Image (cartoon, rainbow, N blue to C red):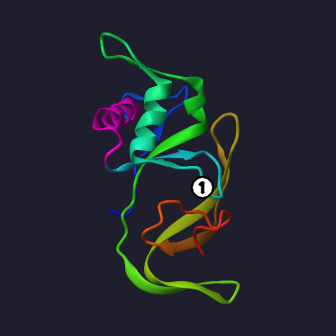
C-alpha cells in the first residue's frame, strides 16, 4: 500500500473517523495507527500504548457507545501507519556518515491550491517533493527534528 488513511479528530469528524478512533481505543493502540500533530517538521507523535492512552484520556464513551472528542484532539490527525520496504543504506547528514543499517523512505508530494469563496479554482500547481529516509527502527520521522535525512 502506498497511501495512508487520514482521520479527522476535529469538529468535522465523520463516521469513518469515529470507526478508526474506536479501533485504536479497543485494540489498546496495537497496530496500524499513529497520532500526529498537525504541523510540519515531525516529532511528538504517539504510537501504540501511548496513542491509546492519549485517545482514552480525550474521548468520552457514552452508555450507548457514542464517542465525544475533547477539543484538544483537533490539534492532531489520526493516520494509518505506512510500513514501507526496508533497504540497506548509509545515511549522511551534512556530508558526514550518520550510520549504516536498514532504512525506510517516505515520499511527500506538495501542491498549492487556491480556491475562491464560490469554489472556483484560482491556482492549482505542483510545488515539489521531499524524500525522507530514516533507520527502520526509528518511529519518529521529521527531517527538521533530526530523525530523518
Give the image location of residue 80, x and y in percent.
39, 50
Q: Nearer the viewer, residue 81 or 129?
A: 81
Q: Nearer the viewer, residue 84 or 147?
A: 147
Is 143 displayed left or right of 85 in the figure? Answer: right
Write down the residue under mark 1: 43
Q: Is residue 43 above or below residue 131?
A: above
Q: Is residue 82 above or below residue 122?
A: below
Give the image location of residue 141, x and y in percent.
54, 63
Q: Quadrant of the N terminus?
A: bottom left
Looking at the image, the residue that sits furthest to the top is 63
Is 1 displayed left or right of 94 in the figure? Answer: left
Q: Nearer the viewer, residue 56 or 36?
A: 56
Badge 1 crowding class, 10 Å Cα cut-off, few under 14, some 14 to 19, many 20 or more, is some
Give the image location of residue 82, x and y in percent.
39, 60
In the rendered structure, does residue 12 fall within the stretch colored magenta? no
Q: Quadrant of the C terminus?
A: bottom right
Give SS at disc 1. Answer: loop
Instruction: State the extent of the magenta-drawn residues as a range.
Output: 17-30
Amino acid at each position: 500500500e502506498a497511501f495512508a488513511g487520514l482521520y479527522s479528530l476535529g469538529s468535522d469528524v465523520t463516521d469513518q473517523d469515529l470507526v478508526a478512533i474506536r479501533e485504536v481505543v479497543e485494540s489498546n493502540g496495537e497496530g496500524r495507527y499513529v497520532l500526529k500533530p498537525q504541523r510540519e517538521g515531525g516529532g511528538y507523535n504517539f504510537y501504540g500504548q501511548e496513542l491509546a492512552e492519549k485517545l482514552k484520556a480525550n474521548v468520552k464513551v457514552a452508555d450507548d457507545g457514542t464517542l465525544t472528542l475533547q477539543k484538544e484532539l483537533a490539534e492532531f490527525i489520526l493516520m494509518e501507519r505506512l510500513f514501507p520496504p526496508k533497504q540497506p543504506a548509509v545515511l549522511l547528514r551534512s556530508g558526514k556518515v550518520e550510520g549504516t543499517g536498514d532504512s525506510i523512505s517516505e515520499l511527500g508530494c506538495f501542491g498549492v491550491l487556491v480556491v475562491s469563496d464560490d469554489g472556483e479554482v484560482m491556482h492549482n500547481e505542483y510545488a515539489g517533493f521531499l524524500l525522507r529516509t530514516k533507520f527502520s527502527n526509528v518511529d519518529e520521522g521529521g527531517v527538521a527534528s533530526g530523525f530523518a535525512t
